[in-house]
Amino acid sequence: MEDLRKRFYEKAKILFDDQVYETWIKPVSIEITDNSCQVITPNQFFRDWLEENYFEQIKNIIISLLDKEIQVYLTVSKSKKILISPSERLHPDLIQRYTFENFIKGKSNEFAYAAAKAVVDNLGGLYNPLLIYSNVGLGKTHLIMAIGHEVYRKYPDKKVVYYSSERFMNELISSIRFEKMHEFREKFRTVDLLLIDDIQFISGKTATQEEFFNTFNSLYESKKQIVITSDKFPKQLQNIEDRLKNRFEWGLTVDIQPPEYETRIAILKNKASYHNIDLPDEIAEFIATHICSNIREMEGALIKLLAYSSLTKKILDLSLAKEIPKDFIPEEENTLTVEQIQKTVSEYFQIKLTDLKSQKKLKTISIPRQIAIYLSRKYTQLSLNDIGNKFGGKDHSTVIHSINKIKKLIETEDNIKKHIDNIEKMLTKNR
């Protein structure tokens, strides 16, 4: 047993970079029985972070060392196993917290959320297949797993299978190698709900595409539900056969955009609440300001901060958030400045930068100026007075008025919300 543990840490040290190994792998211990292996973590924060980021690699190391299939579990040191009642039962192969209840809705994802809920209520119906696409870290995996959990909970007789496309491909290779293609096809073509995550990874894999094409056809003809995620719109997927891309568009295709500031705050608050932590507003605002376009990175920064606070016994406050290691939060040069915001707003509205900082009260200038002030407050850590000074010496009451006015206009005027969304995309692209 000791020899196995030693080899586990040796292999892990090679697989993971030094920072990841020291922070997230070295603190765990492993306990192995004949049929299972427990990976024991110091606390709940560690457990959740490992599950969402490194669990597959850890599991693969253990299985390769034992040279046999074994159940691998993540547990918390000295914790009691949580029992889930039948009405709350969750699919054992899916991340437990990735449910609809824990998915925070906002303008950026409300259509995708509604489509996912509709699929649950009408499996194999109008929205078959459902394809959800977005950039990395915006909630695709959460949403596809939420569908799996909900179907598993509502329809106990339904067979639900979730696979990443990479795992699908590896299992196909293994089935071909050991002449088990009959079992492979039986497994995937007899399900009621097939969830395939990150379909883009079968790019250029001819045999995998062929098998998935036939699996797709079999399920579709049987009116079984297929849900797929991707990092691009189907037509933009490279080195994937046209016949497959065509089928991906037979049902409904929806996208998820980067979350708005308010949604980012809500996501962080929800994540903290899940761990029974009362997250101070200033910390949520700090993280949401510095990480704008990737929910996974944002939640990861929070988990790291919570773990850091727990392990070092330091108070969870803004000063702690600012002193934690640099990799927790992007370095300062990657954050936005008032000058960048002013330049982008001026270019977007095609007005002079000097006008943006002037006292002119024309609506064509005052609204862009107020938007720039609102975004400066949202994306920088400057005080109200400092922001006012950047706009020609405005006092703090004028800055507050501008911020509050834009907040109200966002709720009442769609064109203002659209302008701000467009500017934020420009700012994110140019960072």
Image (spheres, rainbow, N blue to C red):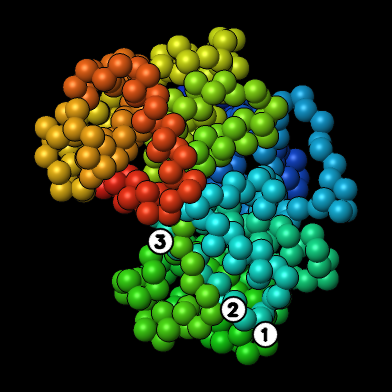
Residue beneath the point at 55% across and 72% down: 130
- Tell me which amino acid carries mark 2: Asn
Give the CA separation, mark 2 to mark 1: 8 Å
Give the CA separation, mark 3 to mark 1: 26 Å
Mark 2 element type: loop
Q: Which residue is mark 2?
A: 128
* Quarter of image, res 191: bottom right
Give the CA separation, mark 3 to mark 2: 19 Å
Q: Which residue is mark 3?
A: 231
Which residue is outermost to the right?
A: 86
Mark 3 element type: loop
Mark 3 and mark 1 lie on one chain; the one further toward the N terminus is: 1
- Tell me which amino acid carries mark 1: Lys
**Residue 223: mark:** 1
Q: For mark 1, does the 10 Å Cα neighbourhood hold few (<14), some (14 to 19), or many (20 or more) residues?
A: some
Is residue 362 in sight in this rendering?
yes
Mark 3 and mark 2 lie on one chain; the one further toward the N terminus is: 2
Q: Are marks 3 and 1 in contact (CB under 8 Å)?
A: no
Of residues 259 and 320, which is closer to you in this image?
259
Instruction: From this view, report whether residue 238 is shown above or below residue 13.
Output: below
Residue beneath the point at 79% across and 59% down: 153
The quadrant of the image that shows the N terminus is top right
